[in-house]
Image (cartoon, helix red, strand yellow):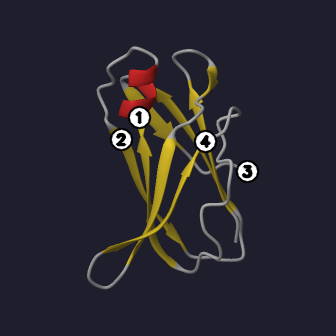
Amino acid sequence: MKLSIEVIDCSFGVPASNVAIELWQQTDTNWLELAVGRTGSDGRLTECLYEPLTNGNYQIDIFLDDYYAHLGSVPLYLRAIVQFRIIDPTADLHLPVFVTPNSFHIYRGG
């Protein structure tokens, strides 16, 4: 399975570059950090976060505070934290994330 994440800054209409993203997997007792990455100039992760992903519960943390601070803005949300489930580890998963200083929206892309 391939996981791809793309962050788009809707407040400026551009890909959000240099945004830190962490990937976590839920275990029986806690959350295990699997990988850390940053978006490139196209808003996509410049490197693979982690492979292979198996069935289970996962979380991505998208760090918005540092991104917007660099642009001279103070966002309402410090991080966008999204928990999701993988039930078919053979299907690729693309997660586009639309952000502004005061909102975020994520969906399963194609």
Residue at position x 73%, y 50% in the image? 110
Residue named by callout 4:
39
Label 2 to label 1, Cα distance in Å?
5 Å
Q: Where 109 falls versus 12 (above or below)? A: below
> Residue 62 lies in what quarter of the image?
top left
Label 4 to label 3, Cα distance in Å?
19 Å
Q: Which mark is residue 33?
A: none
- Which structural element holds mark 3? loop
> Residue 50 lies in what quarter of the image?
bottom right
Query: Which tag, 2 or 1, sits closer to the chain's start?
Result: 1
- Which structural element holds mark 4? loop
Label 3 to label 1, Cα distance in Å?
24 Å
Spot occupied by residue 12 in the image (x, y as percentages of width and height): 56, 15
Residue named by callout 3:
110
Residue named by callout 2:
79
Residue type indicated by callout 3: Gly
Residue named by callout 1:
64
